Amino acid sequence: MFDTFIRKLKLIVTDETLRNRILFVLGALVVFRLLAAIPIPGVDAGALERFFSGSAGQFLGLLNVFSGGGFSNLSIMMIGVSPFITASIVMQLMSVLSPSLKAMYQEEGDSGRMRFTQYSRYLTVPLAFIQAFGFLVLLRQNGIVPQMDFIHTLTNVVVIAAGAILLMWIGELITEFGVGNGISLLIFAGIVAGIPNAISQFIFTFDISQLPAYLGFAAVALVIVAGVVYVTEAERPIPVTYAKRIRGMKVMGGVSTYLPIRVNQAGVMPIIFALSILLFPQMIASFLAQSSIAIVAAVASWIVAVLANQWIYGALYFVMVFLFTYFYTAITFEPTQIAKNLQKNGAFIPGVRPGVMTSEYLGNIITRITLVGALFLGFLAILPIILQGVTGITAVTIGGTALLIVVSVVLDVVKKVDAQTSIREY
């Protein structure tokens, strides 16, 4: 195994195309981190720190994950890829309601998916301006940024929205010219960039009396990593046989293979989708809590207080991760289309009639194994919240979500690099 690793590493270094792809990813991530260090003008660092440590800390911490660490210092990248993720969710939901969008995404191949993604990019632009203005007003209400006139407000909104659009473009470039999914890698880079600061804070706040809790968290983290790797790689093989066909003097087909169906077909997307949806009620409620209308402020404050409750928040988080796992699996895995493709290629599942029966058979299997994947993913998502409720240590809530994203992204990148090296070996 070690020899295989060394051989692939040498291939990465010596192969110009693969080396350039990896260097392009690293260069793009460096540019992103440099841009994320440029703050918008007039930020009150003390007020920002108090705002993060208040009741909105968890909400802002989740937003900081999506901004790649840009929100913690209110950089020009402060809303990060959140508008693009929101636009992608809206487009996925629209594909369920619109048959033409569904056909574009599932039946028209790569060209259809490229058009579908292009529509998501178009939708990202207005969403970026809306989110930029909303967060700017929220921060101004809490005294983090000063009162500004119309021109300065418009300038900051344009700068923040442009940062989000630029970040989306960088992510698309990474996807096209690099290795792995660009948006996921940007989130990954922001999480990893915060590790040195987290380690330094841990060293300065280390309490020897909490050593058993620290060891317990480390053990749980290892179990989570192992569990994510196991479930991500787990699959159910469906046997498939190709019928024999005679063409001229040749007998074709007659071979047996299998159709791999993953236990966690959706990957890390349910986590990202659930967090994106949870951000909006908190953002809107925090915004309306400062309203001059008493009843609106009271209702918004109540919503903020309800979402601040760890157990209610955890229950909503689990349910949304569970539902989004099924939703995203239904979008990406279409049993009817797979059954049609098998039938067109003269393939069948032994003991199952081609066509409708094959579609129902695959649908039943994906429903059952997705239940396991959804429960596991939902449990892993809320496990840090459970640990926080038991121990009272708040730092693990964001760390658990970040850990899920990091492990999934690393697995995806490793598999794609391995695929590239295998192609070049042959």
Image: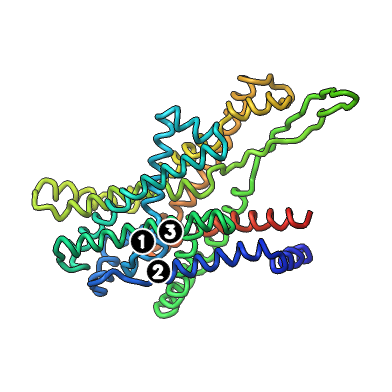
Residue type highlighted by circle 3: Leu
Residue receiving disc 2: 35
User: Residue 408's spot in the image, x, y percent?
Assistant: 55, 54
147 and 113: which one is in front?
A: 113
Determine the image quadrant of residue 149.
bottom left
Q: Nearer the viewer, mark 1 or mark 3?
A: 1
- Residue at the bottom extreme, as displayed: 204
Determine the image quadrant of residue 91.
top left
| Element at label 2 | helix
User: Residue 248's spot in the image, x, y percent?
Assistant: 87, 23
Q: CA distance from mark 1 to mark 3?
A: 36 Å
95 and 360: which one is in front?
A: 95
Which mark, by number, is residue 163?
Answer: 1
Give the residue displayed 54% in from the left and 39% down from the top: 111
Give the residue displayed 81% in from the left and 29% down from the top: 253
Which mark, by number, is residue 270?
Answer: none
| Element at label 3 | helix
Q: Is residue 393 visible?
A: no
Q: Is residue 202 visible?
A: yes
Above or below for 74 versus 63: below
In primary-sequence order, the first of circles 1 and 3 is 1
Residue type highlighted by circle 2: Leu
Residue type highlighted by circle 1: Gly
Quarter the N terminus occupies: bottom right
Residue receiving disc 3: 387
Q: Nearer the viewer, mark 2 or mark 3?
A: 2
218 and 408: which one is in front?
A: 408
Residue 82 horizontal side relative to residue 216, left or right: left
User: Residue 246's spot in the image, x, y percent?
Assistant: 85, 23
